[in-house]
């Protein structure tokens, strides 16, 4: 898919949570995030993390020099979940204190 | 193949050996390429770039024909998702990935609100009128390449995209 779009002269970047799969299908540019399947942009309600992932991926559009480059980002799933849980907990607390 | 930031801080793959596992379970379904396609270059700054988004998460506007998640060979069609849509107007028809996060906040797999924000702030120039969505269960890679990949590439180009962000699910 990504190779087909790049072939039209449109630069592309994809996210991946499966490094070995991406190495096999050789997309032009990719950002590897060590997250769970179905959670490529992070965890629910963590806007800052979701934005950070998108911006890191878009940076690959500018910075990648060779086809097939896979960039990484210094995040972990454990930390993302911790922060996400805190955000959800705080939201629940705020909601309760309003009532 | 370059791997940057190769430090202890770098997160590790949660499921190593995924390719081998899927290839064993569904022989012939995995895409393997031996060559790299030439890079197309971004012609303008990001703040002037019209970005599109392509996703295999099976996200579609409520009321459109649901993806066929039961077909043994897969569904090779795609849906347009207006880039102005809200999560409330979208639903997921795909069963091949964990959706517990996306059901709370669609942006974890289809970050439509974050892309709208980045465009409104001028980080991204603009968004294409449509985003493009399909399901990532396609057991015939040759057919996938010949039909769905080509169809979406045509549609993305017709929508005037200067660059495309893609995400599997």
Image (spheres, grey):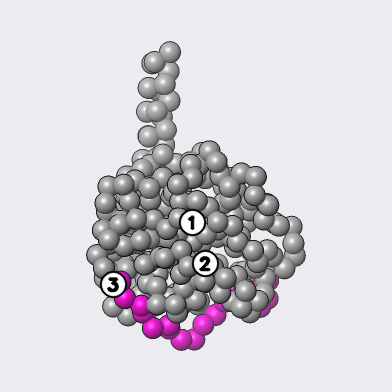
Q: Where residue B50 sits: x, y (%)?
A: 35, 61
User: In the picture, residue B32 is in which quadrant?
Assistant: bottom right
Q: Nearer the viewer, residue B58 or B151?
A: B151
Residue to which mark 1 is pinned: B130
Subunit under mark 2 = B
Q: Single out the residue that lies furthest toward the bottom.
A: B35
Residue to which mark 3 is pinned: B43
Do marks 2 and 3 both belong to one polypeptide chain?
Answer: yes
- B162 above or below A3? above
Q: Secondary structure at mark 3?
A: loop
Subunit under mark 3 = B
Q: Earlier in the sequence, mark 2 or mark 3?
A: 3
Q: Where residue B34 sits: x, y (%)?
A: 49, 86
Q: Where residue B83 sits: x, y (%)?
A: 45, 51
For label 2, count other residues whose C-alpha is less than 10 Å away and answer few (under 14), some (14-19) or many (20+): some
Q: Nearer the viewer, residue B5 or A51?
A: A51
Q: Secondary structure at mark 1?
A: strand
- The numbered mark at residue B155 is 2
Q: Earlier in the sequence, mark 3 or mark 1?
A: 3
Q: Is residue B40 magenta?
A: yes
Q: Are marks 1 and 2 in contact (CB under 8 Å)?
A: yes
Between the C-alphas of marks 3 and 1, the distance is 21 Å
Between the C-alphas of marks 2 and 3, the distance is 20 Å
Q: Where residue B159 sits: x, y (%)?
A: 46, 63
Q: Main secondary structure of the magenta part?
A: loop
Q: Secondary structure at mark 2?
A: helix
Q: Tell me the residue at 42%/58% (across/down).
A: B128
- B83 above or below B139? above
Between the C-alphas of marks 1 and 2, the distance is 9 Å
Residues in magenta? B26-43
Q: Is residue A84 at least partly visible in the picture? A: yes
């Amino acid at each position: 898919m990504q190779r087909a779009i790049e072939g039209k002269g449109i630069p592309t970047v994809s996210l991946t949570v499966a490094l070995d799969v991406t190495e096999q299908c050789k997309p032009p540019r990719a950002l590897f995030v060590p997250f769970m399947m179905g959670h490529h942009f992070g965890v629910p309600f963590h806007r800052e993390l979701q934005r950070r992932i998108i911006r890191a991926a878009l940076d690959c559009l500018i910075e990648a020099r060779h086809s097939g480059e896979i960039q990484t980002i210094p995040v972990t799933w454990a930390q993302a979940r911790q922060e996400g849980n805190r955000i959800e907990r705080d939201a629940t607390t705020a909601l309760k204190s309003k009532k | 193949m370059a791997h940057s930031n190769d430090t202890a801080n770098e997160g590790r793959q949660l499921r190593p050996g995924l390719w081998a596992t899927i290839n064993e379970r569904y022989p012939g379904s995995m895409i393997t390429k031996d060559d790299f396609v030439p890079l197309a270059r971004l012609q303008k700054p990001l703040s002037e770039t019209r970005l599109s988004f392509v996703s295999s998460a099976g996200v579609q506007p409520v009321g459109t024909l649901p993806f066929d998640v039961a077909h043994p060979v897969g569904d090779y069609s795609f849906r347009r998702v207006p880039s102005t849509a809200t999560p409330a107007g979208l639903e997921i028809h795909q069963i091949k990935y964990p959706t517990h996060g996306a059901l709370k906040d669609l942006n974890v797999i289809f970050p439509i609100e974050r892309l709208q924000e980045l465009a409104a702030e001028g980080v991204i120039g603009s968004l294409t009128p449509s985003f493009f969505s399909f399901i990532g269960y396609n057991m015939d890679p040759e057919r996938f390449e010949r039909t769905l990949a080509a169809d979406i590439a045509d549609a993305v180009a017709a929508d005037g995209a200067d660059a495309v962000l893609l995400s599997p699910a």
